Amino acid sequence: MSHYAADADIRGRADLDVVLRRFYTAAFADHRIGPFFTEIAGTDLEVHLPRITDFWERALFRGADYRRNAFAPHAALHSARAMTAADFGRWVQLWNATVDGLHRGPNAERAKAQGERIALALHKRLAGDGAPTAGEGRVGFVPLAALELRSVA
């Protein structure tokens, strides 16, 4: 059993490192979104992890100095193989499940909400004006279904 209690909140970079390692292990293995990381981007987790941890540390705690363009790599992936609402939805589902499996508290809730906002914003920007926005609830837009999944857990 992990030394993380599900009732402990995300406290800092060390907790984010564990969350992100677990998340990316699941994401790389996922049949829907794994190929974006493994085949298209050829992501090296040990190179990616410090950067993405900086991103999340900045997003949650304003603690890291993250100055990279988070949109550019997603745009490159999208041009190689279009990322659909269902792809972003699967990312959200895996993200929420990972956070929920390790942590509870305000920072964990903020991490999940931020993940959902990022997925919606990226999808909208990549897909153009026809993409749904939060609250529109178009059929098949999986991030909204992920909210239902989280509420059942």
Image (cartoon, rainbow, N blue to C red):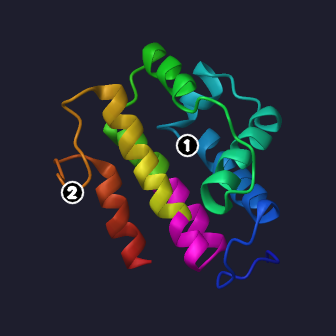
21 or 68: nearer the viewer? 68
146 within the magenta span = no
Residue 122 badge: none
Mark 2, secondary structure of its residue: loop
Pointer 2 with pointer 1, Cβ within 8 A: no
State how many labels appear. 2
Q: Quadrant of the C terminus?
A: bottom left
Answer with the quarter of the image where residue 125 lies: top left
67 or 35: nearer the viewer? 67
Q: Nearer the viewer, mark 2 or mark 1?
A: 2
96 or 153: nearer the viewer? 96
- Measured as percent of width and height from the top left, residue 106 is found at 56, 77
User: What is the distance, in whole Å, between disc 2 and disc 1 at their CAs?
Assistant: 27 Å
Residue under label 2, please give it: 135
Magenta stretch? Answer: 93-110
**Residue found 76% across the figure and 30% down from its top:** 44
Residue under label 1, please give it: 30
- Measured as percent of width and height from the top left, residue 10 is found at 69, 71
Crowd rating for badge 1 (residues with CA inside 10 Å; few <14, some 14–19, many 20+): some
3 shown above or below 140:
below
Q: Quadrant of the N terminus?
A: bottom right
**Residue found 55% across the figure and 28% down from its top:** 36
